[in-house]
Image: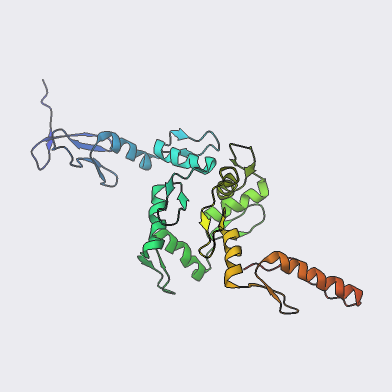
Amino acid sequence: MRARSHEYNQCGKAVRRSPGLTWCTGSPPGEKTHRCAECGKGFRHLSSLRRHMRTHSGESPFACHHCGSAFCHQSSLKTHMRTHTGEKPYTCGQCGKRFSTRSYLTVHTQIHTGEKRYACGACGKAFSRSSYLRVHQRTHTGEKRYTCGDCGRVFGHSSNLRRHVRTHTGEKRYRCGRCGKAFVQSSSLVVHSRTHTGEKPYPCPKCEKAFIDTSSFRKHVRTHSREKPHACVQRGKAFSRSTPLVVHKRAHAEENLRNGVDMRLPLSPSLP
């Protein structure tokens, strides 16, 4: 009978090996004895190591039935599904803003704590995540690596390109479960759903009014601060909202026509 060869680790226990996997047969519980042969990352359970190995092999057995995107882990698919349903189960205890993942909530809370560990070497602006810093740095370099195949427009971030492409395809993948109305962006579905629930997460600090979205909130706050960012370039008159400026410009155009003056004013305001 041929003798079996064994390898032993530092604890003196036998080590078993198979392609991509290395684990100890008799290690104390709690230790990360299951180690990935590709990157060296350790795991407490063999099942966790096997799931991790999919990140190297490219195996993606969990597919989304809405859009066909595939994922290595079932948990990743579950998180992805929230982009279709608009579900945001993680709520900020400070301001009430909601998020689809715990990691997004963790990053958001740093807005309240002021923690920003990643600083830009060009302008000094700091960010809570390294990925945010990398995207910001493209504003200095002018790098826009993501190009629309339909119109040639370029973007500095892939998510901006994905949103833009839907303006060409007309795809509205985010559908309201109550009334069936569909939207291009998940954020639009979230705001729309508040018309059904009555939720108004943006209260005014000056009065008792509350709003379903940030744009409505900001417009209202200007009524207290008297900020008027929408100015007429001809007369200099300013407005707190864009709609009165449009009406004001039309009045100019009609007056100029009556007086026989050809002053072609743009009817659409320049938004900040």
Q: Does residue 73 show up?
A: no
Residue nearer the viewer, 46 or 217? 217
Where 187 sits versus 256, above or below? above
Horizontal side, residue 174 vs residue 17: left or right: right
Residue 236, image x, y percentages = 71, 79
Q: Quadrant of residue 245?
A: bottom right
Q: Quadrant of the C terminus?
A: bottom right
Toward the top, the furthest residue is 1
Toward the bottom, the furthest residue is 235
Q: Residue at 39% x, 57% y: name it.
A: 109
Q: Quadrant of residue 268?
A: bottom right
Where 106 sits versus 24, above or below? below
Q: In which quarter of the image is residue 60?
A: top left
Q: Residue at 52% x, 58% y: name it.
A: 203
Toward the left, the furthest residue is 12
Q: In which quarter of the image is the N terminus?
A: top left
Q: Residue at 41% x, 73% y: name it.
A: 124
Residue 250, image x, y percentages = 80, 68
